[in-house]
Amino acid sequence: MNGVTTAKQARVRAPEFPSGSWFNVAAPLSLRELRGKIVLLDFWTFCCANCLHVIEELHALERDFGDELVIIGVHSPKFEHEKSDTAVAAATERYAVTHPVFNDPELHLWQQYAVRAWPTLVLIDPGGYVVAQAAGEGQSSGLALIIEDLIERYDATGSLRRGDNPYRPPEPSGGELRFPAKAIRLGEALLIADSGHHQLVETELDGVTVRRRIGSGERGRDGQRLAEPNGLTELPAELAAAVGFDIVVADTANHQLRGVRSADAAITHTVDLVAGLAGTATVTGPVPPVLSPWDVAWWPAIGQVVIAAAGVHLLLGWQPSTGAVSILAGTTVEGLKDGPATDGWLAQPSGLAVQGDRVWFADSENSALRYLDTAGQLHTAVGEGLFDFGHRDGPASQARLQHPLGLAVLDDGSIAIADTYNGAIRRYDPATGEVSTLAAELAEPSGLVLVDGELVVVESGAHQLVRPITAGRLGQVLGAALQTRRPVTELAAGKVELTVGFTPPPGRKLDERYGPSTQLTVSSSPPDLLVSGAGSAAELARTLVLAGPPGREGVLHVTAQAASCDSDPATEHPACHLARQDWGVPIRLSQDGSSALELTLLG
């Protein structure tokens, strides 16, 4: 849950850490030992793009309050793969987490702190009491104001401790490649997005022998610098000649695209996707600026580059010759919904493959294989929704994936899937509707490229490219279909009062100069769970009507946003801030369930 505890509410002692595995520390930590420090808990999971955005935001707090503040990541896994200490250690290094991390595979702390969504931040004062709780991105500026107030108050009493930061960086891993993401064939070479080195690497077709590197290797957003590049695509020769570059790169952590001229290995262009979407809105409002483009693909059928914008659950289209950016599919609501593309729901689309009038995409948080056609319709081939996953072959209706990130179209028209969290390569045959396993026991495969009929796999967790599939190899895995079991909110059938509280941080007020400063959008999975109350309106309170017998389960999708500005009367043009959060609240209808659902938005 996302909320702020004020002085008017009962003081709540922060629950202590249970025994478990720690990373980025010399020894396990406890809140008792941290008394006198301000502590910020970040409940995250490494599959979650929004969680990765928050890790970036926390760097500013680490810089500004390094002496007084200790940030601790509480890794709270969604998928089975994410429970592993080995996987958490790799993710902590991959995403440059510069604070201690505690792995909580059974979600003990998640339940004790009443967390409802990834990511959630919990602020603990030097006395060991919870003072604020906030879900979602964009919370750092509001938390900074609260931290400044805590520093002033506890400094005055002499009870604030400074220094003694427990963070210890891990030993770096990797070699020529470090957490490579995806690769494409470029003539008689491979071009690899070397995400951990913030570069592109051109190799021989063996994927091992390095020819050259593109980009300085320094993390950044301009010049020859990149930040965690992922997807790559090559433009048609005539178009490339016209625009001055032939390779398009998904510069993921910078939320932009870059244009590369392969002839001289120069990064020549920057595509500001956020600016390109200015003025574009969906049913949930303006598109947030944290796009996290995870893959790109040239789609000849529409003459555009398709962008898998994982951070906002959209497929975008970009026309290099005009610079126009548009929404091809999605509404920014995270979920699985087919039909008209601009009314559909996606969940972190992360891998693309073009096949005629279809662009296939790995919808990673849905553990799904889906496609968009040129008629503007969304279809799902494999997958059930946000919380259904597993490693199971057979008919597509029963098959399960686990957070896939990469795709390739094979010579026979079937689709190869980098089934990342299962450590496997899967195959979907559109002609038969069957799913099979081609290879297993890989370390987080994230990209696929076909080289002379042979499938080359980007094995990201092992920092290498491999060829694991031998001719004629085909297996069947009949594993269990799994579900993410987060704590479920028991609600009553019939009327339920939904309220989203919003209190601007100290020194800010609601911005109502140009109309309503708040918006609330509600939908559900399945759609018929919500009889009334769906849609968007300005008020942050609404009566919902839920349908179904006791025991029925589903997910309420709630998006709230509020605009606030600095309230200093001496400032002619105050700085303004937009707070936004998306909740996916698992619910179960019950005779004894609550008739109220309360959420809170921190500014």
Image (tube, rainbow, N blue to C red):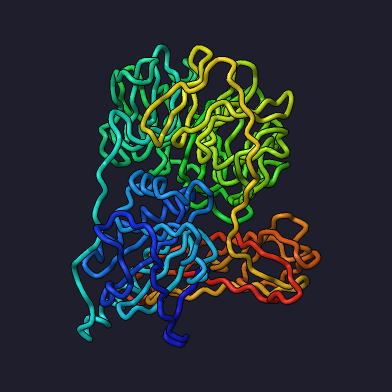
- The outermost residue toward the right is 549
Question: On screen, 538 above or below 592?
Answer: above
Give the x, y percent position of residue 517. Answer: 54, 68
Question: On screen, 258 above or below 261?
Answer: below
Nearest the eye: 170 or 587 = 170
Nearest the eye: 125 or 456 = 456
Give the x, y percent position of residue 157. Answer: 22, 86
Note whether residue 289 is visible. Answer: no
Residue at 69%, 59% (x, y): give it: 554
Q: How many marks?
A: 0
Give the x, y percent position of residue 1. Answer: 53, 68
Residue 301 shown left or right of residue 237 in the figure:
right
Residue 404 shown left or right of residue 187 in the figure:
right
Note whether residue 388 is visible. Answer: yes
Residue 242 shown left or right of residue 162 in the figure:
right
Residue at 40%, 25% (x, y): give it: 465
Q: Quadrant of the C terminus?
A: bottom left
Nearest the eye: 408 or 237 = 408
Question: On screen, 366 above or below 595?
Answer: above
Residue 426 shown left or right of residue 243 in the figure:
right
Nearest the eye: 422 or 536 = 422
Give the x, y percent position of residue 5. Answer: 45, 79
Residue at 65%, 72% (x, y): give it: 498
